[in-house]
Image: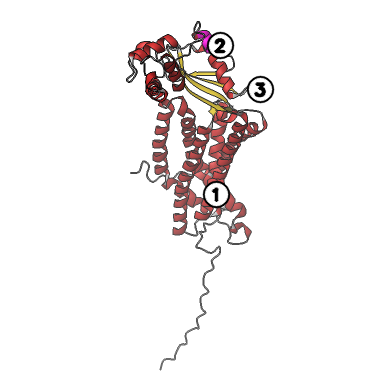
Amino acid sequence: MELLRHTNIDFMKYRKFWIIISVILMAVGVVAIIGAFFGFEPLNFGIDFAGGTSMTLRFREPAKLDDLRQLLGAAQIQRLGDAKSSDVMIKTPAARNVTEEGSGERITAALDRKYNQGQAGKPDLNRIGPDAVVQILLKTDPDHVAALGADAARTHYQAMADALRTERNKTGIFTGWDNVRAVKGVSPAAAAALEQAAYLGDYGVRSVESVGPQIGSELRTRGFLAVALSLLGMLCYIWFRFELRFGIGAVMASLHDVLVTFGIFAALRLEFNLITIAAFLTLIGYSVNDTVVIFDRIRENMRKNRRRPLIDVMNESINQTLSRTIMTSGLTLLTCLALLILGGDVLRGFAFVMTIGIIVGTYSSIYIASPFALLWEQLFGAETKGGAPAVKGGAPRSVSNDEPATTTPAARPRQRPRSRSKAS
C-alpha cells in the first residue's frame, strides 16, 4: 500500500535553512544538559535523580490538594486519576541532616495531626504491617488458642494478618470495620479485638519510595552516559553496515532528536526520571530505524546509476520512501498519543518524549540525516581530495563501497588503415 505515489519533492533544496533551524533548537537541549551537570537545574528532576521520598496515599474521601499543599509546605502533590480519585502522590525533596525515612515520618505525622486527631496511643490498621497485627492478636488472644502453644497461636493469627494485608492491598484502605469483618479468614472475635485495640485512619499508605541524594546523582550520570553510549554504538553500526558518511548522518539525526526533545521537555518542566531515560533510548532506536530505511534505498539507487550526483540520488530515495515514512510514523504517533492521553501520570513522561520524538525524528530523517551525510561527503569525501571530479557545481558523484573512486574508460586499440587493391 502506498499513500503517495510518484512524488518529486526537492527536499535537499532548502537543506541549509533547515540545518540552521535545527542547530538553534539543539542549542536549547545543550544548555539544559549543561545546567543539569553544573547546578543550574533547568530540569524538574524526579526523586530518581534528585533524591527524596515519594509516597502514594489513598484517602477515605477525595482530599483537597490545596489543603495538603498548605499543610506539607514544599512537597510536590498531585492527584492520581480524575477529580473524584482518592489517590494522591506526595513527593518531598532530599533535605540536609534528614534521612529519607525521616521525610516519610514527617509527612505521616503532619497528616495525622489533621486527619487522625484523638487517636493517640492506638495503631492505625490502615498503615501497620502484619507483624503488628499478629502482636495485637497474640496479646488479646480473641480465639483462645494460646493453650495450643506459642508457635501454633502465632501461626493461627499470622494467617489472619496476611489475609488483612492482602485485602488492604486490593482496596488501598479499610473504610469501615464492616470491611474488616468481611475479610475471609478473620474470625469475628479477632475483628472485634482489632476494633478495640486499633483504629481506622482516614488515609492509607499504598507505596513509599526513597532515594538518597548521592544515589540520585549517580543514577543521573549513568542515565546520560547510557544515552551517549547508545549514540556511539549507532555510529559504529551504521559505519559498518553502510559507510562512514551515512553513519555521521544517522548519528547527527539521532543527536538532533534527543537534544530537541530534551529542550522541549526541559522548557515544559516535566518530571525527569528513569522512565524518561528509557524513553530517550527508545527514541534513538526508532530514529535510527527510520533513517536506515532511507539510507538503504539510497544505496540501492547508487548501485543502479553510479555516475549520478549523490544529491539527486538522495532526493529520489527520500521521495520513494516518503509513503512508508508517513504511514509508519503516523501509526506509531497514534499509539503514543493514546498513551499520553490515557496512560496516566506514571507513563506521561515516557509518552510525551515518544510523541514529540516521533514528530522530530520523522523530520530529521529527511532534513538532517541525508544533508549531513552529503555535507560530510563534500568536505571529506574522495571526490574533494583529488579522486573523481565533482559533478553539477560541486555535488559529489555517488560512489558505493564496491566501486573504485575513479574509473577510466579502456583505451581503444589503434586500427591500421585498410589498403585498397587496384582494380584489375
Q: Between tags 1 and 3, which lies in front?
A: 3
Earlier along the polypeptide chain: callout 2 or callout 3? 2
Which corner quadrant holds the C terminus?
A: bottom left
Q: Which residue is mark 1?
A: 235
**Residue 71 marker:** 2
How many marks can you see? 3
Per the rendered image, the range of residues in magenta is 110-114
**Taking the image as drawn, is residue 69 in sight?**
no
Residue type, numbered disc 2 = Leu
Q: Position of residue 40 (x, y in %)?
A: 66, 28
Q: How far is the residue under mark 2 from the one under mark 1?
A: 52 Å
Return the residue nearer the eye: 143 or 322: 143
Is the residue marked by circle 1 packed among few (<14), some (14-19), or many (20+) residues within 10 Å? many
Earlier along the polypeptide chain: callout 2 or callout 1? 2
Q: In this rendering, is residue 47 above or below 375?
A: above
Residue type, numbered disc 1 = Leu
Q: Residue furthest top?
A: 118
Q: Secondary structure at mark 3?
A: loop
Residue type, numbered disc 3 = Asn
Q: Which residue is mark 3?
A: 97
Q: How far is the residue under mark 2 from the one under mark 3?
A: 21 Å
Residue at image position (39%, 42%) is 323
Is the residue marked by circle 2 packed among few (<14), some (14-19), or many (20+) residues within 10 Å? some
Return the residue nearer the eye: 407 or 184: 184
